[in-house]
Image (tube, grey):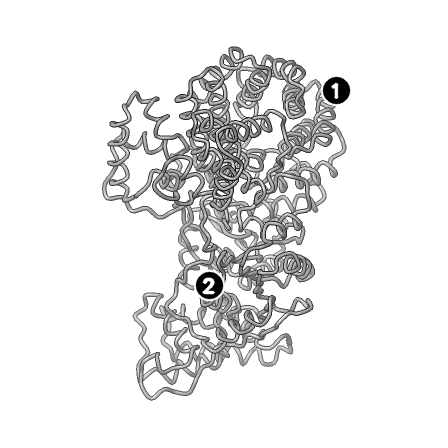
Amino acid sequence: MSGAVGHGRTGNLPAETSSFVGRSAERAAVARALAAGRLVTLTGTGGVGKTRLALTAAADVRDRFTDGVWQVDLSVLRSGRLLARTVASAFGVQEHTVRPELDVLAEFLAGHRVLLVLDNCEHLITAVATLASELLAAAPELRILTTSRRRLSVPGEHVLAVEPLPVGPAPNGAGPDQAGDAVRLFTERAAANGCGFRLTEQNVETVRTLCDRLEGIPLALELAAARLRLLSPEQLLTRVEERFRLLAGSGRSGPPHHKTLRGAIGWSHELCTPAERLLWARVSVFNGGFTDSAAQQVCTDAELKADAVRDVLRSLAAKSIVRCEESGGQRRFRLLDTVREYGLDRVRELGEEDVLRERHLTFCLRLARAAEHAWSGPRQLAWGARVGREHDNLRAALEYALVTPGKERAALELAARLWFFWCACGQLREGRDYLERALALNSGPCRDRTRALWVCGMIAGAQVDIPTARARLLLAEQEATEQHDRVGQTFAVQWLGQVAFLEGDWGRAIELLLRARAAHGPKAALNPGPIPCRVTLAAAWLARGRTTEAMAVLDEARGLCEEAGEIWMRAHLDWLLATADRARGRFSAAVSHAEHALWTQYVFHDIVGVTVNLEVLAGLTAAQLQAERAATLLGVADRIRRAYCVKADGAPFLADIRRQAAHTGREFLDEHAFRTAFERGGAMDPAEAVAYALGLPGPPPAPGPTAIAPARALTRREERIAVLVGEGASPAAVAGLLRLSRTEMDSQLAAILGALNLSDPAQLAAWASARPFPDGDAPDASPAAHAT
């Protein structure tokens, strides 16, 4: 099973970042429970270590699950309606139909031996219980391990209560190996803080008493350990005792250990400076994670200056209030769920929640506007990764706008402006859902509504939901006409042309697309306007057998792409160029175009594009009398269609490509040989298939953020080549653009890979997406930078 294009079978379980493991008896109990039953729930109060136990126990039994161990953190979800989609995303499932998402996920998992770890389920109990029941019924080899503050109450559920770490008796020696798990964790965290702390014979009893007073709760221990930078263990114990004496008479009650944890968090809060307390509260409105620049935009005012935010965040990280991590070459911060809840309580006490939610929404709108504006340029992959890292924040902003009176238009704009993320980054179902909900709240005609209508129609067309696509687009055209909205009219006509193409009405498609091409003004954004319009127009001409007209349009579109540095739609026109070149008998050029398209769509995780290109290459391979290889490629494409629910009976033009490839392959193989090769392809993962199709020595690594330590700086020419290849261009295409021979290109690539300490050209995608944005182009620039 593949988690996404480029992922292997091992799953997505994060590597352990701490030398402390502990809980050996509890881990063994989890392993036994997973062997005896198919649903195991770890329950306990927040901060008690459920997640760490789940992940370490899952790592212990990883070898039992041939299709991997997969973790999904549900703490960032605010709505159960996103649950199936979020779990599916962990496996890389991109839903391209209108089938119920839970059905799609269940079908995907059926027949595979997987351990699914659903972390932080307590706020979505009903939805998680339903999902677990459905998946377990559909996939007999599936096991599910959940963490929650309360049980799911599903038949067959094994519930294990997670207790705090044992403190243990005072050890005879001074080393942490003789202490209980609580003392060991405290010691490790203190040492990691760089304060020079060591467990000695002189302080061991104080530390043991402190851990006992904190009841062995891991989060409380970590917060306390962070204070050893300023306090001795004896001072720390005194402060904790004073705090808990005050809490003893508060009368508050709750689950076991809850009061102690809240006390430890509250004590940490009191020891923060006023600026730290204020920023802690304000950043709690972020969902998932945030950058320091994002915090500057959302959290600052006269009371908290923007130029202080970075220093305050570093201080909060030193105190273990926020976690700091690298993602895509960018430093990001996040709050643990329990700490975030405490911060939200403080925000509400300050009466700032509505103001901060609105600023957060404004931040997301600015990001969407900036990314949409830049999407037709040379940094599409980097922008896609940047927006992807903010996916949880975008969801939170959309949910806020959809339920807050007066923010309906903002929801409409944000959902529509993210069209590139929904379409190019595999989020069709989610984008359509948000658009439909926003449209339902905005019934009065306006330009934002017209835009949302045609974007919704465009997405429905991509899902091959022709009736909905046509209805939305006709309404968009009508409302645009009434408002004299020429831009809205043009887009509605263009995507109605796409609908006609999908139905096989080539003449109608050409008529509408020619109208749209003529109507797009010189300032129209290349995407989703002039380039997709020309790509579909060329496809319609090819479908009618008019290769000359198709080539003229494709050359025009290619010129636009090359001038702008656009690579996403360039891949789509490249597989059309491959089809056109095949019709003209130019097989070598056709293969080159198809390989370039496949490479780019692999980098973009474009499942539909990868599938179509495999079928195009299969047809070219069969026509070159390599029938066995063609059958293998068709088997891969078929497996991807079934696994990722790519509709097989979509546009007649695409169906003809597939049928023609199969027909040509069968001309040169008997049925048994064809079926054997077809099934061999069906056993490949997508990454293996891409490597096979492109002739790579092994599966390319998954594109995405990766820490890269270069051995030397690149020259200007090397950097240009690296950027082009990393952002989706195939080496052959770059060689043609820069007028390099194949030998020269191979030599340049070898030098670049050596300089960057990389082993494969596909790894340049990670390097390119991690490059910092140049000044003035940064998506986290000042609030005014991207206002429209």
- Against 139, is 190 above or below? below
Q: Would residue 187 be seen by someone viewing this image from the given angle?
A: yes
The residue pinned by badge 2 equals 62
Residue 453, position as x, y percentages in the image:
69, 30
- Against 726, is 491 above or below? above
| Residue type indicated by callout 1 | Glu
Instruction: Name the residue: 62% across, 42% down.
Output: 430
Residue 523 left/right relative to 180: right
Q: Residues within 10 Å of mark 1 (few under 14, many from 20)?
A: few
CA distance for labels 2 and 1: 61 Å
Q: Nearer the viewer, residue 256 or 435?
A: 435
Residue 717, position as x, y percentages in the image:
27, 28
Which image quadrant for residue 511? top right
Label ID, residue 482: 1
Instruction: Name the residue: 43% across, 77% down.
Output: 181
Q: Nearer the viewer, residue 284 or 693?
A: 693
- Secondary structure at badge 1 equals helix
| Residue type indicated by callout 2 | Arg
Q: Would residue 374 be seen by someone viewing this image from the given angle?
A: no
Residue 415 left/right relative to 71: right
- Against 745, is 211 above or below? below
Residue 89, position as x, y percentages in the image:
55, 48
